[in-house]
Amino acid sequence: MIQLTWASLRPRKPVPGRGLLDPSVTRLRVHPGDLDLYLHVNNGAYLQMMDVARSNYIADIDGFRKIGDRKWYPVVAASTMTYKRSLQLWDRVEITTRVLGWDERVVYIEQVFTCGGRVAAKGYVAGRFLGPGGLRVPAPDVVALMGPDAPATSPELPDDVAAWARALDVAHRDASPA
């Protein structure tokens, strides 16, 4: 939690030339508080690490400055994880965060954990931005602000991510006829 607070309140400096679709890498070390009774990283700790990495991604594209005046803030609408191998105490971990695409409602993000060059876990996040009073900010508005160099339309989502979004009902829905 301390790492997330630090990453959000004292974000790292923007990376010159970093675009919305460029990956961002966060390097962390597994600490004792990240472990469960089986002495590997607790599944909830992965989600907190992902929060830190998403905050770093936003910082890399100078997003905190861009959304600050509007009082927008990110929230998670849905997430899913796949675990490949355990992370243990003092392991050095890299989390690569990248935007896969967006629809009218959410931005789809992939976050891959690697340790020693091997994939340890992969997560997908459907993220939204909210504004004052909990007002939902359309994802294309966020993309236009955060990535003025981003394409006008979303890249096509991988089939498994699109199916996941539909299954959880986070994907944009066309208005049904009355």
Image: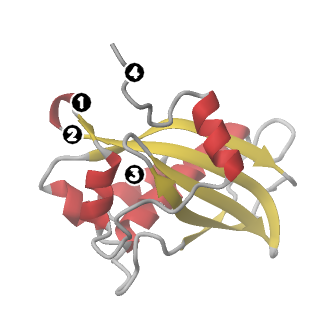
- Report the amino acid beneath label 4: Ser
- Report the amino acid beneath label 3: Thr
Q: Which element type, helix, strand or loop, lies under badge 3?
A: helix
How far is mark 1 from mark 3, CA to CA? 21 Å
Residue 100 to residue 12: above or below: above
Mark 3 neighbour class, 10 Å CA radius: few under 14, some 14 to 19, many 20 or more: few
Q: Which element type, helix, strand or loop, lies under badge 4?
A: loop
Q: In front of the other: label 4 or label 2?
A: 4
Q: Quadrant of residue 177?
A: top left
Q: Indicate how the structure is coloured in the image.
A: secondary structure
* Residue at mark 1: 134
- Residue 74 in picture, x, y percent from top left: 36, 46
Q: Quadrant of residue 105?
A: top left
Q: Residue furthest top?
A: 178
- Dot placed on the residue nearer the N-terminal end, 2 or 3: 3
Q: In front of the other: label 1 or label 4?
A: 4
Q: In front of the other: label 4 or label 3?
A: 4
Q: Is residue 26 visible?
A: yes
- Dot placed on the residue nearer the N-terminal end, 1 or 3: 3
* Residue at mark 3: 5
Q: Which element type, helix, strand or loop, lies under badge 2?
A: loop
- Report the amino acid beneath label 1: Gly
How far is mark 4 from mark 2, CA to CA? 26 Å
Front one among 162 and 18: 162
Front one among 173 and 58: 173
Mark 4 neighbour class, 10 Å CA radius: few under 14, some 14 to 19, many 20 or more: few
* Residue at mark 2: 131
- Dot placed on the residue nearer the N-terminal end, 4 or 3: 3
How far is mark 2 from mark 1, CA to CA? 5 Å
Q: In front of the other: label 2 or label 3?
A: 2
Quadrant showing the C terminus: top left
| Image mark for residue 176 | 4
